[in-house]
Amino acid sequence: MRSFLKTKTAIALALTVSAGAAHADGHGGVEVLHWWTSGGEAAALNVLKDDLEGQGVGWTDMPVAGGGGEQAMTVLRARVTAGNAPTAVQGLGFDILDWANQGALANLNDVAAAEGWDDVIPAALQQFAKVDGKWVSAPVNVHSTNWVWANKAVLDANGIAVPTTWEEFTAALDTLKAAGVTPVAHGGQAWQDATVFDAVAMSVLGPDGYKAAFIDLDESALGGDGMKEAFDRMAVIRENVDENFSGRDWNLATAMVINGEAGFQMMGDWAKGEFLNAGKVPGQDFLCFRFPGTSDQVTFNADQFMMFDQGGAVSPEQAKLATAILSPSFQSAFNVVKGSVPARTDVSNEAFDDCGKKGMADLAAAASSGNLFGSMAHGHANPASVKNAIYDVVTAHFNGEYDSETAIVELVDAVSIAK
Ligand code: BGC
């Protein structure tokens, strides 16, 4: 109910703001719909705003709060239905393909050709940015979801080394619980539950099993013993969150780790943006490591800006925005702040901190070993209908509505109805 009301308010706001936005567009600006509203996200967005404003392109901001972007996508649908699409919209994976297939996106091929996108944007991203030979969106970054963020002082005080196996991880959770520290900072929202599940499932199923289950939607993988074990591990994690977890925003969960109220958070590397925004230093104040059992794999999601067709060729402002996003200097400056890594393969890692350098190295290694997979939780494994069906089961199980045995039966069922 709460998120429904939030969404209704957001839509009302979107439809009101849009009148002003059309005016701003008329004066040569861009209206940008996005969900980057946390402190770290807003700091990263400012890098883009400043870049554009420096080129004389006005910016009308259309933020829609809600991690993972579900609320933003609801607002987008309302805007498009009202015949008033924003100029540029943050989008993920299959959602981008969906809008492209509906013919809603402008053709960026001229910009892409002039800037050589084909040569520098990795294939894993191109599959979500190019449809039928046409570039329809500008990739901003590559995030990945199988990370753990830890408060170093809390770990040190409790004699905990970085866990590399599930057993070491659960032992660390037990130690923290006994010490009166919340072991896992978590926000009970479906997309956050699914983000944790991305990593947990990968750790149990391995790359082949993850692909079979979430990308190929193979029933025996979705309903197999490995998946049951993944749900069992989610139940262990559920026992290690605090009692106020329900509905909490992801950045507030990150703040619990920053403040030392909690030991760990399993979250994508946008969480790093929150640590940096709070003045924390990787290796000194906080630690980043891959979820135990997934050190060779990467489950990725890439933020892109879809350019909505404004009734003709791509507008000069859209072209400027796209060019700015893919410029190597912007790719470095933005991703250093955001916590993600560049969407181009030719950007130096020099300006990045240790977590960022690790993120870049992990991504390159996973891409060359065949261990790079689209994140189920962040719309890079399946269209929204299937993703949402998986969300429902993961969340119902996390909230104790059914046990792991029932969860795998429900998962097979829900996916087969949705696909
Ligand atoms: C996006 C990130 C964003 C996160 C939390 C993810 O889906 O890719 O850019 O920071 O959601 O809002």
Image (spheres, rainbow, N blue to C red):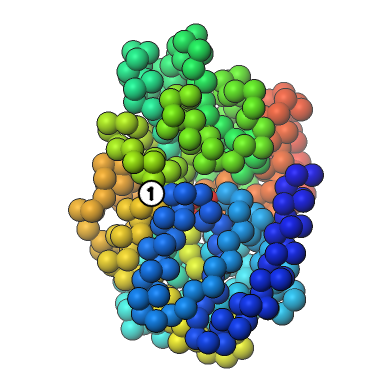
Of all residues shown, which one is farthest toward the left? 350
Above-or-below relation of 172 to 10: above
Which residue is the site of mark 1? 339
Label 1 beta carbon within 8 A of ligand 1 = yes
- Which residue shows up at 77% across the image and 50% down it? 4
Is the C terminus in the top left, top right, bottom left or bottom right quadrant? bottom right
- Which residue shows up at 73% across the image and 33% down it? 396
Disc 1 element: loop
Classify residue 48 by image quadrant.
bottom left
User: Which amino acid type corresponds to the residue marked 1 in the rendered image?
Assistant: Gly
- Which residue shows up at 50% across the image and 86% down it? 28
Q: Position of residue 190 (x, y in %)?
A: 66, 41
Above-or-below relation of 256 to 17: above
The answer to whether residue 151 is left or right of residue 189 is left
In depth, the one of 141 and 200 nearer the eye is 141
Neighbourhood count class around disc 1 (C-alpha, 10 Å): few under 14, some 14–19, many 20 upward:
many
Q: Position of residue 70 (x, y in %)?
A: 65, 54
Tell me if I can see residue 70 in this picture: yes
Is the N terminus in the top left, top right, bottom left or bottom right quadrant? top right
- Badge count: 1
Classify residue 286 by image quadrant.
top left
Classify residue 140 by image quadrant.
bottom left
- Which residue shows up at 38% across the image and 63% down it? 47
The answer to whether residue 171 is left or right of residue 353 is right
The answer to whether residue 338 is left or right of residue 188 is left
Q: Position of residue 179 (x, y in %)?
A: 47, 10
Above-or-below relation of 378 to 87: above
